[in-house]
Image (cartoon, rainbow, N blue to C red):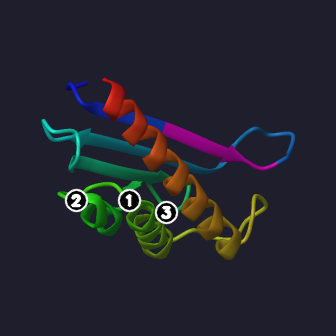
Amino acid sequence: MPDRSGIEYIRFSSSSVVDKPCVGVSVRISLDEGRKTCQGVRVVLGCVAPIPMRARKAERVLEGKPLRPERVQEAARSAAEECSPTSDLRGSEKYKRAIVLTLVRRAAQCAYERALTS
């Protein structure tokens, strides 16, 4: 992984006998040389579409800008809106979107903190 980069993967599993993830989120953030601006942002969502998908709208919210709490929240909302979860035994569509929102927010913050120290 390049210098000034951080990555975080978080998976959420519902309480069941089968430990199959309900939602998975991975975020990679690289920082410019001044460690202020996000670049090379990738947000990938699993289990909320037929195949793992990039949340490109969420990436665009963060790309080329300093990471701020309100921007992270906007990116998380974008990711939750652009995914297409289906209701099943592990949760409803609405529930999975709420999980995506929370996990993208957490993963982005962790990836950013790792990028600051790498």
Give the residue at x 34% y 41%.
28
Q: Is residue 65 left or right of residue 79?
A: left
Q: Give the CA separation, mark 2 to mark 1.
A: 9 Å
Q: Main secondary structure of the magenta part?
A: strand
Residue 13 counted in the magenta span: yes
Crowding near the residue tagged with mark 1, few <14, some 14–19, many ≥20 C-alpha atoms within 10 Å: few
Residue 49: numbered disc: 3
> Which residue matches tag 1?
68
Sequence-wise first label, 1 or 3: 3
> CB atoms at circles 2 and 1 under 8 Å apart?
yes
Which image quarter holds the C terminus? Answer: top left
Quick check: 47 above or below 13? below
Report the residue marked by disc 2. Answer: 65
From the viewer's perspective, is the residue at label 2 or at label 3 nearer?
Answer: 2
Q: Which residues are magenta?
A: 9-14
- Residue 42 at x, y percent in the picture: 30, 49
